[in-house]
Amino acid sequence: MNILLLGSGGREHAFAHSLSQSPLCEKLYIAPGNAGTALVGENLAFAATDFCSYQTVLFGQTNFFSGSRPRRPFW
């Protein structure tokens, strides 16, 4: 399964590290990520609230899961 995790903080790093250990995780993407998340997955250079980029990443993908826990509402 491909996973897109939205966020750039310490919690996201801990979550990314745990997800990367799963045998079900084929590829882990983090947007925008940080130096720590780059060690366990691939950082994408767009904000967690940039829905156009978010759709571009997911478009045409299969077996994709995305997750986020923003501090601010998306709206």
Image: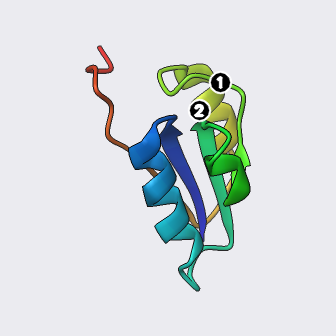
User: Which residue sits furthest top?
Assistant: 75
Q: Residue at x 56, y 77 (%)?
A: 21
Q: Secondary structure at mark 1?
A: loop
What number is the disc on residue 67? Answer: none
Q: Residue at x 45, y 57 (%)?
A: 14
Q: Are marks 1 and 2 in contact (CB under 8 Å)?
A: yes
| Amino acid marked by disc 1 | Phe
Quarter of the image for residue 43 reads: top right
Q: Position of residue 31 (x, y in %)?
A: 60, 36
Mark-to-mark CA distance, 1 and 2: 8 Å
- Left/right of residue 67 with respect to residue 5 in the rendered view: left
**Depicted 75 relative to depicted 60: above or below:** above
Q: Nearer the viewer, residue 35 or 45?
A: 35
Q: Secondary structure at mark 2?
A: helix
What number is the disc on residue 54? Answer: 2
Residue picked out by circle 1:
46
Q: Position of residue 24 (x, y in %)?
A: 56, 81
Q: Is residue 41 visible?
A: yes
Image quadrant where one finds the C terminus: top left
Q: Residue at x 71, y 48 (%)?
A: 38
Labels 1 and 2: the sequence-earlier one:
1
Q: Position of residue 52 (x, y in %)?
A: 60, 21
Q: Residue at x 51, y 48 (%)?
A: 5
Q: Nearer the viewer, residue 32 or 58?
A: 32
Q: Nearer the viewer, residue 14 or 46?
A: 14
**Depicted 42 relative to depicted 34: above or below:** below
**Depicted 43 relative to depicted 45: above or below:** below
